[in-house]
Image: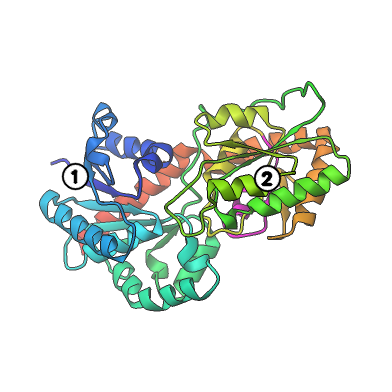
Amino acid sequence: MTQKLLYVLNHMDWFWSHRLSLAQAAQAQGWDVLVCAPGAAQDAALKNYGFRGISLCQISGPYSALRATYEIRKIILRETPDLLHAITIKYAFLAGLATRYTSVKVVHTIAGLGYLFAGDGWRPKLLRFLVTPFFRAAFMSPRTRVIFQNPDDLALMVRRGFADPQQAHLIKGSGVDLEKFTFSPEPASADNRPLVLFPTRLVWEKGISVFIDAARLLEGRSVAARYLIAGGVKTNTPRAIRAQEMTALLQGTPVEWAGHVEDMSALLWQSALIAYPSWYGEGIPKVLLEAAACGRPIVTTDHPGCREAVRSGENGMLVPVKSAEALADALDDLLRHPELRQKMGAASRHLAEEIFDVHKINAQTLAVYERLCKNQKSS
C-alpha cells in the first residue's frame, strides 16, 4: 500500500524554489505526495508532477495562526497521512500542535530560528516567553524528528529544551541543483568594474544598511566596482524594508537595486563576488549555496547559518556582524586581487559539490523519514 506524505509549508514559492526536488525524490521512493500551503489547491503546476495541493489559510496574526492549526488538524484527520513534514519554524510549531493526540509521524525542518528566536527587543522576548510551553508540546513527542540546518540552532534548541538530542538531526540546508547552478568563470568587465552582488530578502537584519555603508567606504577608497542588491519587497515579516525606505537608503550611494530577480543563476554568473552581511536567524541561506555552485567567492558574516557556506580563507571570508568597515576591508582585498577571486571561486564550487549537492541533501532527509517510520513500526 502506498504511503502518504504531507508537506506543510508557508508559501508555494518556497516549495518550488526549495523543496520540489525533495518531493520528487520522495515520490520516486513510492510516497504519495500532498502539498499543503496557502493557495496550493489552485496551483495547477502541482498536477504536472503528480502531486496534490491542499490550501491553507494565510497567517497574518494570532487568530489566523489558530485557524491554520485547526485547518492542519482537519486535513490530517481527513487525509490520514503516514508522515507529515513541516517546514519553517512557524509551520513546524503549528503542525506540531495540530498533530498532538494523533498517530501521524512528524518531521520538522527548522530553516533558521528567524525573528522569534533571533530578534532583539521586548517583543520577540515576550513572544519567546509566551510560546515556550507550546513549543515543547509541539516538538517533544516520540513520533517527531527535528531537522536543523546548522549546528548552532540545534545546540540552542536542545539547550532550551525544545528538542530532544536523540530526535534531532543536522542536515546542512535544502541543497543546490548543481546542473542548474553551474560553474562559470568570472566575466570580463567592460568598464573594469567587477560586480559585487548582494542577493537577499529585504529585511533589516539581512544587513542592507551595512552593505550600503561598506560600498560608500569603498567608493571613498577609489576601489573600482559596481554594487547591486537583488531582492523584492516582502510584507510577511515585521522587519521588512518597505520600497520607500529602500529608495531613501540608496539615495546618493553607489549601490543599485534590481528588485526581485527570477533568473538568479544568470545574475550570479554576471557577478564577481557575493556579499551577504546578515545577522538574521538563518538556516543556511540557499542563495549562498547557489553562489558557491556558480563558483563565486563569498563574503559573509561569522554568524550561525552564514558561516556554514564559507571556509574562511578558502572560498571566501567571514566578517563580524554589523561591521561595514570589516565588510569593506574584505571586499577591498578581493576586488584588488582577481587571482584570489578565481582561486576562491573554484573552492566554492568544490564545497558545493562536496556538501551541498541537492541529491545528497535529499538522501539525508529521506533517511530520516525511513528511520522514523521503521522505529515507529517496531515500537
Numbered circle sitting on residue 3: 1
- Is residue 61 or residue 173 the one in the foreground? 61
Q: Residues within 10 Å of mark 1 (few under 14, many from 20)?
A: some
Q: Residue at x 25, y 64 (%)?
A: 66
- Is residue 292 or residue 117 the one in the foreground? 117
Q: Residue at x 78, y 21 (%)?
A: 190
Mark 2 lies on a secondary structure that is helix
Q: Identify the residue at the far right of this view.
A: 221
Q: Residues within 10 Å of mark 2 (few under 14, many from 20)?
A: some
Name the residue beneath numbered marker 2: 250
The residue stretch that appears in magenta: 296-310
In-image side of 378 versus 185 (left or right):
left
Give yes or no for residue 304 being in the magenta stretch.
yes
Distance from the alpha carbon under mark 2 to that under mark 1? 52 Å
Mark 1 lies on a secondary structure that is loop
Give yes or no for residue 175 being in the magenta stretch.
no
Q: Amino acid at mark 1?
A: Gln
Q: Amino acid at mark 2?
A: Leu
